[in-house]
Image (spheres, rainbow, N blue to C red):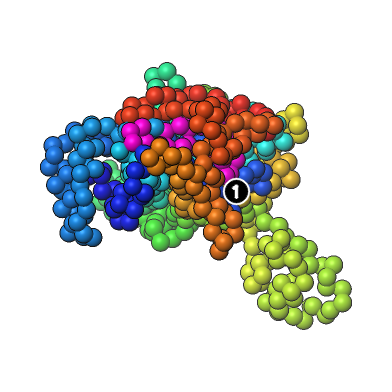
Amino acid sequence: MISTVTDFYKVDHIRQYPKGLNKVYSNFTPRSSRLFNRSSEYDNKVLVFGLQRVIKDLLIGEWNKTFFNQSSSVLLQHGKLIKETIGEIDMKCWKDLHELGYLPIEIKALEEGTRSPIKVPVFTITNTLPEFAWLVNYLETSLSTELWKGYTNATTAFEFRRVFEKYASMTGVDKEFVKFQGHDFSMRGLSNRHDAYTNSISHLTCFYGTDTIPAIQGAIDFYKADTTKELVGTSVFASEHSTITMQIANYISQRRKNLLKIASTLPDRSDGWLNSDWQTDLNDAIKDEFKYLQDADGSYYEIIDEAQVKSISKNDCLARCNMDLDNLDDRHIAEYEVLKYMIEEVYPTGIYSHVSDSYDYWYTISNTVKKLKDYIIDRNLKDSNAKLVLRPDSGDAEKIICGLRIKDLAPLLSDINHHDKLIHEIAIFAYNHINTAYYDGFFYEGKSYDWKGNIIQEEAIKGSLEILWEIFGGEINDKGYKVLHPAIGLIYGDSITIARAESILKRMEAMKFASSNVVFGIGSFSYQYNTRDSLGFAMKATYGEVDNRQIEVFKDPLTDSGTKKSAKGLLRVEKYDNEIQLFDQQRPEDERTGLLETVFKDGVITKETSLKEIREKIDNELNKI
């Protein structure tokens, strides 16, 4: 029942307004960006987006469905609920509205896709019939709860895009790539499925990559998107921990089963593995289509090509019967097989994203992937679009991608006798004499240590980019930055914020890696960890008419810092000195001009903007920055 979607204090405001009220004129404005999670380039603007969805979904869809198209019994439900919870109210105004059959409201708004400064209204709202002046601010609560997130998330997406564009420009990356560099991972952390359908469209204003399928449907339903004619949103085939750990566990289980099966089914051998002529037994097993390969590291697994089989000792094969999921070395062997299977049989073409930290990320990237190098490159040679994308999903994103900063301790040790000290004492000395906010550990007598004196893996020091560069190489682009071989890539989506992405790209630039080597998954930390206060959105009345007398109203609390001070009177928004500005206390004829255009009037949407047009507007805006 949409008529009761409001705050309790709104239900009797009709009696609080002056008698003879003809008009209420309000606006929806971002008042402050103090709490907004910004980039270093943030210029105190919001990306206007989301009102069109709310008009179609709420002001037309929900109001028609649950109020205007219902029988008068909806009024009885409304009145009963209010009476039983706060007290009886006069329902005549609601009966009149129900009989009217539409919302007698006019909304004038900035065009969606516009970037507008803080403190400039994104839309104004007023009544079109004098007897329904009370309705304007009655709608405030439902409009606010539906709108603030769309504007805030669109602004967040723009700031990500701005950062990615900046580093693409610096490191010689095609700007088209940037449209895919931010990938929406947020749905599981949003408020509910409706949130994904309605507000995750905001991400699509600036990016094409998303795992939030409902957002694409939302773009179709509310922003004239057409997946048959344009790319609205897309993703890639990708694994998760459940699929990979299940495959690893299954391999270990099946491996044991198959070896034991061979032992019990060798032709004419009742004693199984005990036969002294091991090679003969092996050859017989091969004839029965049980085949094994001995790899350079001594591991064994089933193969197809008989020519690859090498001699395997009885004890070695018996040892393989004892593969254990709790044994890390056995998991290493199994993950090699699983990853090989995924890129050769499940996804021999196209992009496949492999979650890589199920057990031992550094081993996977530096050993497992290295052994599969030829397969990975061959896959790309057969299909130029084929790429294995590794997805680390834990740890500190900047350190996982870019490695660790290690400080040589030797220059600091000249004044102390350190040879008789234990390593934990050396670590305490290092912690007290090195900038730990910048460095991640110290180098001492041929080894690297963390601040507790634990040895740090060489792979962790190098980081993912350096490891993959050493394995696969790539090219140096025209601006002198490293671009990994097209067969391999990285995506990181664990708690990525604008600031964190910016920090990673800054490190990459210093390391001479192009920004295109990493795609970022933008999750609910960025798209859900916001509130209405992030951009200070509020809907306030600034003008009214009582018995056709014009009344300018405003608020300016002495106890406030100035954030809550509102505009006064009728409003006009214009572009002046190349910037969008607010002009208040306008005459009625001046209020009818400017950038605020009627988008909704008397139950009908009067102007629509497509997602394609919004994207074009954003692209043009970015070209100016």
Q: Residue furthest right?
A: 415
86 horizontally vs 398: left or right: left
255 horizontally vs 437: left or right: left
Rendering coords of residue 115 (x, y %): 57, 35
For image coordinates 23% across by 60% down, the residue present is 86
Quadrant where the C terminus sits is top right
245 horizontally vs 583: left or right: left
State yes or no: residue 113 in magenta.
yes
> Which amino acid is tagged 1?
Arg
For image coordinates 16% across by 43% down, the residue present is 74
Rendering coords of residue 147 (x, y %): 42, 42
Q: Residue furthest top?
A: 229
In the structure shown, which secondary structural element does the residue marked by tag 1 occupy? loop
Is 422 located above or below residue 515 in the figure?
below
The residue closer to the viewer here, 555 or 350, is 555
For image coordinates 87% across by 73% down, the residue present is 414
State yes or no: residue 400 in magenta.
no
Rendering coords of residue 28 (x, y %): 47, 42
Q: Please state the extent of the stretch shown in magenta in the rendering.
A: 107-130
